[in-house]
Image (spheres, helix red, strand yellow):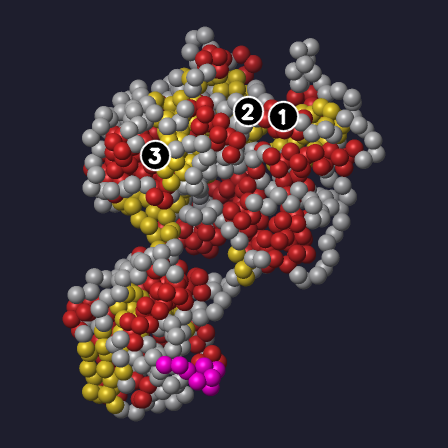
Amino acid sequence: MPEAMETLVDLLDVAAAEHGGRTALTIRSGLRDDTWSYRRLRARSAALAAHLAEDRRLEPGARVVVWGPNCPQLVAAIFGVLLGRFVLVPLDPYATPELRARVVDRTDAALVISGFGEVPDAPTLELPALPFDEQRPYRGVRPRADDLAEIVFTSGTTGRPKGVELTHANVVANVRSAHAALRPTRDFRLLSVLPLSHMFEQTAGLFLPLSVGASVHYTPSRQPPVLVKTMRRQKVTAMAVVPQVLELLLAGIEQEVRSRGSLGSWQAAHRLAPRLPVAARRVLFRRVHRELGGCLELFVSGGAALDPEVGAAWERLGMTVLEGYGTTECAPSVASNTRDERRAGSVGRPVPGVDVRIGDGGEILVRGPNVTPGYWRDDEATAAVFTADGWLRTGDLGEIDRDGFLYLRGRLTDLIVLPSGLNVHPEDVEAELAGEEAVGDCAVVGAADPERGVHVHAVVVPADRGADAQERIAGAVRRANARLAPHQRIGAFTLWEDDELPRTSLLKLKRHEVLGGLAGRPPAGEPSSARPTADADRASRLLRILVGLAPAGTALGPDSDLALDVGLDSLARVELAVRLERELGLSLEEGALAGAATVGELTAIVEGGQAVSPPVAFPEWALGGPARLARAVLQAAVLFPVHALVCSPFRVEGREQLEALDTPVLIVANHASHLDTPSILRALPRAVRRRVAVAAAADYFFRTRPLAIAMPLLLNAFPFSREGAVRSSLEHCGDLVDGGWSVLVYPEGTRSPTGVLQPFRAGSGLLAAGLRVPVVPIAVEGTHALLPKGRRWPRRGPVTVRVGPCVRVDPSAESADAAGRLSAAVSALGATPGVESPEARDASRAA
């Protein structure tokens, strides 16, 4: 990193100057990737800064709350706020309405930039509608190194939110430290999975890769299948994760191994791997690496303690896992293992520029240029977090070995750190639960068990110890959970046997004694099991899955609480979505599952879910250089000469439309004969033809292995599902266009048995709108007479290919309307539209 880089705005400016045309950010938008270069990111950030300063009249130092899902627009909003010398206030995408309101109030926010619609009682600028005029420069005052850059409210706060102040200098210092520890290069391709409201993701997952000209890739969903697709498509090399993501991915791989019946060879490979170098391990587990895109080699883990065995398992697979430690107050990195030196169970040595010492009672103390100046408008909390000589109290316990490696030994304070990396303040949860009439007293602690790890556990003294006390407390916990954020929800509870919880003389809870008293006591929220019926319907199969996820012995019914009885936190719901797709054949968005609080609500969502078909394998080899060379030779020497013998005379009208094509494009044509594709390919200029892929019916042209090889080799055809897994076929068209390939499709779906133009399927409209490229209409005349549907050998005759002017389809157009426009464009070229007879319609459907 250049020494002159003093602010985050400097970071963006230098990156845009040195890497202007390189890819900075991407996200899957519809059927294609929305790709942002460094130059585009800088221009759009400047346009937003100008809007805020000139149109919104915000003064330097005004607080701007930014709240939305990870995407390039959110990154531009972050940099736009920073460039305008305003103060960024990032909010977690899953923040409750109560927390949002408190943060807006605490910071006197001048504006909320929201990706989730308007925010009540606050001026709101919606993320999808940000004013991104790339020609509008920002002419205001630039920020200085000591300017306040952001106020970060740590996860878990619902009472009096505490905002950590971070200056530009704090964050830039941490980026420098992370650079020295991780040594990223411009070839880094990082997949972002953690919210940008967290400093770990900001530093390791955004500012660090951008500082070296690398690329960051976002996804519209955190479901592992979506993450894996992105890894393959973008050839991802690195990820910044919390431990639970590593656990989820590893569990998915092992589940796939079991389903293939390969557990024995998998375990044998793991026994052999420690004796092999990294390169050999990657060969040994080449199938896993191929599934993950073939390039993934680095995980940076933080936010919570990593199970050493999980880290070791990934290392055996040939990955590098670097565990680190930090706090929001340190922007956030304090210590990290490095590529050259890493030790299992340790969080590494202090990062360059940061000093760490162990204070009284074993508390980790930190000093350095990355450390916060204090808490927003909270002098008391600021004074309490620093020692008399200026060291930051982290509240974590640790020890440093003789080689300088730091080991964590627990928490000095009551904060609960979940495996997802989210924090829970016990007092916030206790306040909700204590308000229930059935609760006499309560304490909330972070309890751990082998099945679910650390979870929020409530210890309750009932107000009345009657026979139904357990049932009444269970109801109280469920009602409290309904008011809490998903990560705060109580996962289990225990009835305390004594009439009072252990407290000090000042009535402060002795949480360590509460935790000690839990040892050996089964949670009251885990009654004896009741097995679901063996019916094959979705509801009973869902119940079997949930019983498998829940703690042993849990009985589940429609009113069972997903957090309390099953133990589902936010990332566990992601795992559930994966299992529903794998075991029930359902595709459910993570957001839909997040709204379910009970088994009954989840069952209703599952019963309304859409079934998915197995994914289609696309012949990627056909796009490579050797196949392209062979195809050109075969077409010139065999296909086109044979076509000339049959289709004679052969005429092309509107060739000037083809000469002026700005590729890639979507080509749509009528379909009446197997001669159509050779006719269109022959009509195309060579420069266009060599980059065209043809959508061919998966259930017809790819039904045998010889056909599945011949069709891609001769025509560059790929399987397009007419039913079932249509979405994956549409997405593959997007991948092709992103790669610079034009796509030829037949929107009728099959050959017309009469030669009459059949109605275009709505999917063609979705494709035209989603690809966001010009559409070239083509009408082929004469082929139906030469080789109609049902005839095996053609006769000789004239064929004419007519090319029309490009059609532009609005990305927001309705699918049916877009399909109608395409049909009209092809019809205008001479393809005869008409009303099919019932016999013809039946024949078409049968085909």
Residue at image mark 2 = 159
Where disc 3 sits, the SS reads helix
Distance (Cα) linking label 2 and label 1: 9 Å
Highlighted magenta segment, given as a residue range: 834-842
Distance (Cα) linking label 3 and label 2: 26 Å
- How many callouts does the rendering have? 3
Task: Point out residue 92 in the picture as x, y percentages from the top left corner.
Answer: 46, 35
Residue lying furthest top: 388
Q: What residue lies at 40% left-to-right and 22% top-to-bottom? A: 165
Nearer the viewer's eye, disc 3 or disc 2? Answer: 2
Taking 815 as reference, is 653 left or right?
left
Relative to 815, residue 518 above or below: above
Q: Label 3 amino acid?
A: Ile
Report if the CB atoms under discs 2 and 1 are less than 8 Å apart.
yes
Residue at image mark 3 = 78
The quadrant of the rendering that contains the C terminus is: bottom left
Q: Nearer the viewer, residue 223 or 312?
A: 223
Residue at image mark 1 = 431
Where disc 1 sits, the SS reads helix
| Precedes in sequence: disc 3 or disc 2 | 3
**Residue 362, quarter of picture:** top right
Residue lying furthest front: 121
Task: Point out residue 80 in the picture as x, y percentages from the top left corner.
Answer: 30, 34
Task: Point out residue 633 in the picture as x, y percentages from the top left corner.
Answer: 24, 74
